[in-house]
Image: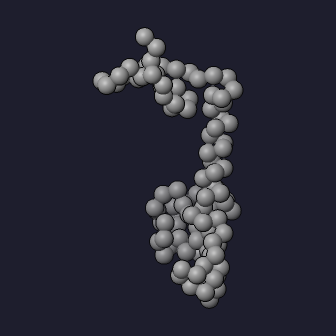
Amino acid sequence: MNCPEHLMLDAKWLMIWHHQSADIRREYVSWAEVLNPLRYEICIGQGPGRYWHINDDAVAWHLLRNAIWRVKTLCWLRGHDWRELNSFQKPTMICNRCMKTRPAEY
C-alpha cells in the first residue's frame, strides 16, 4: 500500500514504509504489527525509479507467514484430511487443513 499514512520516514535519500494487514488508520493498528520489523520496507536512492528496495512490499513477512502455515498444517508429514467437495462439474476431494484438491475415487 502506498498511502501517505504508511510512510514512516521521508528523507532526501531514504524512505521507510510500514505495510499493514488492512487499510486502516495508524491509531487502530495493533502493536504487534507496528513492532514487527518484517513489515517495514526501506528505500534508499535518489528518487522514484532509482530506489534500491530492502524487503520490497514486505515480502519477508509473507514468506514467514506461509512457512508458519505450512508447518502448522503438517499435511506433508501426517497425511491429508480428505472430505468430499460438492461440485456440479466433477466429484472432487479437498483437504480440510491445507485446501489441496484431487479427483474423487469412485
Q: Nearer the viewer, residue 58 or 102?
A: 102
Question: Which quarter of the rendering shows the C terminus?
Answer: top left
Q: Residue drawn 64% across and 65% down?
A: 55
Q: Is residue 28 above or below residue 44?
A: above
Decide if residue 34 is in sight here: no
Q: Number of marks in the image?
A: 0
Colour scheme shown: one colour
**Residue furthest to the left:** 88
Residue 10 picture location, percent across and down: 59, 82
Q: Residue drawn 65% across and 79% down?
A: 44
Q: Nearer the viewer, residue 47 or 61?
A: 47
Q: Nearer the viewer, residue 34 or 102?
A: 102
Residue 4 picture location, percent across and down: 48, 75
Residue 26 picture location, percent across and down: 52, 67
Residue 45 picture location, percent across and down: 63, 83
Is 83 displayed left or right of 38 in the figure? left
Q: Is residue 67 above or below residue 7?
A: above
Query: Splitting the image into 4 quarters, where does residue 13 fall?
Result: bottom right
Decide if residue 102 is in sight here: yes
**Residue furthest to the bottom:** 12
Q: Residue drawn 59% across and 23% down?
A: 80
Q: Is residue 99 above or below residue 33?
A: above
